[in-house]
């Protein structure tokens, strides 16, 4: 069980949900994990969970929308573990469904700064370190909201569509440098983020579940296993893609 032995992975948004599950999955496969997130207590819990399964991890407090924080996140990784092999750029926030004319400039800036600029900043500092060791793999978290639209959350949808554009362009740029860059596009996954937004309304929650042909939402662990595959040697020819993990939502 050491697919990633001696490798180092940064996970942004590792304090809960998909990020936490992926951090633990990487650690179980032997990777040293850097948990980069804003919330101290929850991030430290992720580090504890990793240590409980015999893994190695540390937490670096990071707001992905702040360039200085992201720079420090990568610098600390190199200082402590000496290298960087994988970046899971996953931190993100949701949008509370609201009619478009009622949405504020503040909401727009916050969503774009975290969901889009945060991914760009992470790649900006991860790529130079990966180049030093001959390569690596990056997975950016988009969403099925990066592939199709939903009413009431246009800024979230735009931010996730943009993550796919960023992923494609960066992937081509580094394809010959040994860095494979892809995106993951989850369907509904029951995490804090979902419960805080669309999941708040029981009727909408039921409607959303029914829209997944599989008849249920996904688990953070099901997304984590797809992220690990994208980082594995088995995905060696997979570049610039969005891997959709959505219980069939977008194929009906
Ligand atoms: N849950 C779903 O249904 C779903 C579906 C598709 C895509 N996603 C995406 O998956 C990713 C993870 O979401 P989740 O569902 O695990 O929710 P979550 O709320 O449990 O996790 C989001 C993480 O990002 C962190 N975060 C938020 N803003 C940050 C910032 N500025 N700097 C650093 N960290 C920050 C949070 O602290 C948390 O750890 C998000 O990008 C989200 O858009 C989720």
Image (cartoon, grey):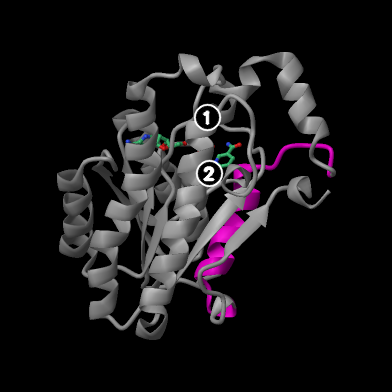
Give the quadrant of the N terminus. Answer: bottom right
Q: Which residues are magenta?
A: 214-234
The verdict on label 2 being within 8 Å of ligand 1 is: yes
Q: CA distance from mark 1 to mark 2?
A: 10 Å
Q: Going by the image, does 40 lie left or right of 230?
A: left
The verdict on label 1 being within 8 Å of ligand 1 is: yes
Residue drawn at the location 72% of the way across and 37% of the way down: 217
Residue drawn at the location 23% of the way across and 61% of the way down: 125
**Residue 224 placement (x, y as % from top left):** 57, 53
Instruction: From the image, tell me which residue sits under label 1.
Output: 193
| Mark closer to the chain start, 1 or 2 | 2
Regarding residue 63, the answer to whether it shows in the image is yes
Residue drawn at the location 55% of the way across and 59% of the way down: 227
Q: Is residue 216 magenta?
A: yes
Regarding residue 23, the answer to whether it shows in the image is no
Q: Is residue 174 magenta?
A: no
Up the image or down, 141 lies above or below 196; here it is below
Q: Residues within 10 Å of mark 1 (few under 14, many from 20)?
A: some
**Residue 197 placement (x, y as % from top left):** 56, 22
Q: For residue 83, what is the image quadrant? A: bottom left
Instruction: From the image, tell me which residue sits under label 2.
Output: 18
Disc sitting over residue 25 in the figure: none
Query: Could you say whether the residue bearing mark 1 is in a helix, strand or loop?
Result: helix
Q: Going by the image, does 202 lie left or right of 53?
A: right
Up the image or down, 18 lies above or below 155; here it is below
Marks 1 and 2: which is nearer the front?
1
Residue drawn at the location 49% of the way across and 17% of the way down: 101
């Amino acid at each position: 069980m050491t697919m990633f032995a001696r490798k180092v992975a940064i996970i942004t948004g590792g304090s809960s949900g998909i990020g936490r599950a992926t951090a633990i999955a990487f650690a179980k496969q032997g990777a040293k994990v850097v948990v980069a997130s804003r919330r101290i207590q929850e991030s430290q819990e992720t580090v504890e969970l990793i240590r409980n399964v015999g893994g190695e991890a540390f937490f670096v407090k990071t707001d992905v929308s702040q360039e200085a924080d992201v720079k420090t996140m990568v610098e600390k990784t190199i200082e402590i573990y000496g290298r960087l092999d994988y970046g899971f750029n996953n931190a993100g926030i949701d949008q509370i469904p609201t009619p478009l004319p009622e949405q504020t400039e503040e909401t727009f800036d916050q969503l774009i700064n975290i969901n889009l600029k945060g991914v760009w900043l992470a790649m900006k500092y991860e790529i130079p370190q990966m180049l030093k060791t001959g390569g690596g793999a990056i997975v950016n978290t988009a969403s099925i909201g990066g592939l199709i639209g939903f009413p009431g959350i246009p800024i979230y949808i735009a931010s996730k569509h943009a993550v796919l554009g960023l992923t494609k362009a960066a992937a081509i740029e580094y394809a010959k440098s040994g860095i494979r860059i892809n995106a993951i596009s989850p369907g509904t996954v029951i995490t804090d983020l979902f419960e805080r937004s669309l999941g708040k309304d029981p009727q909408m929650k039921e409607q959303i579940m029914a829209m997944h042909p599989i008849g249920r939402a996904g688990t953070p662990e099901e997304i984590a296993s797809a992220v690990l595959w994208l980082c594995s040697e088995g995905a060696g020819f997979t570049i610039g893609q969005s891997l959709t993990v959505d219980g069939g939502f977008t194929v009906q």
